[in-house]
Image: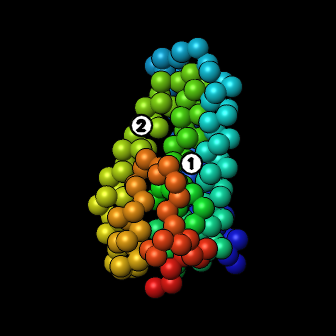
Amino acid sequence: MMIVRHLLAVLLLPFTVVVAAPYWLLNSWAEIDTRWTSLWPLGAGLFVFGLMLFGWCVGLFARVGRGTLAPWDPTQRLVAEGPYRYVRNPMITGVAAMLLGEALFYGSLLLALWAVLFIAINHTYFVLSEEPGLAQRFGDSYQVYKANVPRWIPRLRPWEGEDGEHKGQAHRI
């Protein structure tokens, strides 16, 4: 059942953002899309990096957080492992990398603007809704995590946890 929950969340959210919307933009608005020379190797590499980061985060949400990326089926545990030891929102970073990779791959100004819009919407959502919700759900553990791990720009060294030692597991609240 957990696999179905994750597939549904991935199909409804990231698939729409990374596949459906770019497909629509490239095909429906091609006549106004100012294209530059495709940087396809860089775009492909950035896309693959983003996909791998996204997949890693989804796996951590399932295994450690016991939930999904969907707001209607959130994690039950605070995930503070893997890339979450460097930055609080690596899943969004992964999706943004895929979008920017697509923009570079196709040389599409519209896809670049879509990526910027996606980043702006997510920043607003995280500041106004996601972070207050996490603080309410996970209390002091999230506040300590938030104080030590940046929202978007990764730390140079991984956060080691509240007591200076990485716990290897998320905090149970």
Helix, strand or loop under label 1: helix
Q: Which residue is mark 2?
A: 116
Left or right: 143 with respect to 153?
left
| The residue positioned farthest toward the bottom in the image shown | 173
Q: Disc 1 versus disc 2: distance between alpha carbons? A: 14 Å
Q: Amino acid at mark 2?
A: Val
Is 3 or 89 nearer to us in this picture? 89
* Residue found at x 52% / y 54%: 157
* Dots 1, 2 in contact, CB < 8 A: no
Q: Quadrant of residue 39?
A: top right
Looking at the image, residue 77 lies above or below residue 68: below
Question: Looking at the image, which is closer to me, 152 or 71?
Answer: 152
For badge 1, the amino acid type reads Gly
Q: Nearer the viewer, residue 74 or 27?
A: 74
Image coords of residue 94 (percent x, y)? 56, 48
At horizontal 46% and vertical 68% (from top left) the residue drawn is 71
Q: Which residue shows up at 50% across the image and 49% down it?
A: 156
